[in-house]
Each structure stands twice: as C-alpha cells, then as structure tokens.
Image: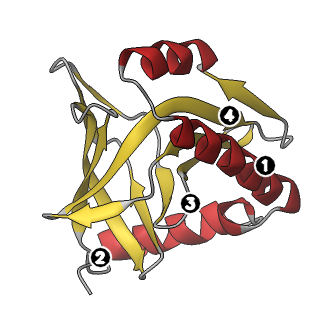
Amino acid sequence: MNAPKIGSWVEVQSYKHNGTLHRVWEETMILQSTKKFYIGVNDKTKVTEYDGYTWRTKEPAVCYFHSNYWFNVIGTVRTDGVHYYCNMSSPILYDQGALKYIDYDLDIKVYPDMTIKLLDEDEYELHKEQMNYPEIIERILFEQIDILKQMIYQKKGPFVPGFLDYWYERFLTYRS
C-alpha cells in the first residue's frame, strides 16, 4: 500500500480542475493512514498560493481526507468552540510524498453550534463555466454535499464530539 507513515510529514496539494496547482500546505503530520482515509494535523504551517504568495496558518488544524468522499474536512478549535471548513473536492490521493486533491470551489462552514453555511457558489459557477466541469462532476458534488450534511447532523466521522481534541493531543505527543 502506497501511503504515508504515521508520524511522517507530508505536503497537502490542492489543484484546480484544469490541472493547475492552487494551494500547498507545506507540512501536515500524518496521524492515521488507512486505505480509505488519512488524518493529519498542522500548526502554523506555511501555505503557498498559486501566485506564489505565502502565509502561515494561525491555529492548529486537524485534517480529515477520504479516498471515497468528494470532500475533506479541516477542523480548528478556537476560543468560541470548534469550527469546521469542508472543501468540496475530489477524493484524496497520496502520490510522490504528497496528499493531492482537486478543489471544486464549493465549501461548507460549520460553526460551533453546528449550523452550516454553503460558501463560494459564485466561484463554483464561474469555474464550472471556465474549466468546463462535466455534468457528472456537478451531480457528484451535490450528492456529496448531502452526504456531508448527514455526517454533520449525525455527528459522524470528523464531527464526532472530541475528535479534534483526540487527534490534536496525539499530534502534541508526536511533536515532543
């Protein structure tokens, strides 16, 4: 099985549908690595945008990537509670030392009270036209949005209470 080892650092690379590199997170530590999913954590990691602009994340993030789902989930713990940012994307692929996916613009923000908001619909419509997203992609993405919402409402997968705390504590153990 070609997969990152637990405790290893990998890049996370986000691409656009036309194959261009969109964004790179320099270092994410892998804490769970199976045939179906990866869990990683990063903290104040360097991010490089498609235009070369760089910045650092502000807080620790627990990342959930799945090889069957068309989304990934990034969770952060802030002073007002747990926030999730869910990217609608192709399933994750581990290739040449990096986790890779295609970003399909639509995002779902989950607030500490578990309310959700669909984001970037205008960006999705623009890119769908510019990059000629096939009709099947749109159908898959909206089916996956429904699956993601069910996971959120049922508190499954990365939305299980305590999930972020557990994986962040493991991250601190590996780092020390």
Q: Earlier in the sequence, mark 3 or mark 2?
A: 2
**Secondary element at tag 1:** helix
Which image quadrant: the N terminus? bottom left
Q: CA distance from mark 2 to mark 4?
A: 28 Å
Which residue occupies the extreme bottom position in the image? 1
- Residue 122 coordinates in the image, percent (x, y): 58, 12
Mark seen at residue 47: none
The C terminus, quarter of image: bottom left
Q: Residue at x 53, y 69 (%)?
A: 167
Question: Distance between the Cα atoms at labels 1 and 4?
Answer: 11 Å
- Cα–Cα span, label 3 and label 2: 24 Å
Q: Give the residue pinned by disc 3.
A: 69
- The answer to whether 150 is drawn above or below residue 32 in the figure is above
Pick whichever of labels 2 and 4 is earlier in the sequence. 2
Query: Is residue 176 in view?
Result: no
Element under disc 3: loop
Residue 81 image-quadrant placement: top right
From the viewer's perspective, is residue 98 above or below residue 145? below
Q: Which mark is residue 109?
A: 4
Hey, what amino acid is under mark 1? Lys
Q: Is residue 98 left or right of residue 148?
A: left
Nearest the viewer among 143 and 166 is 143
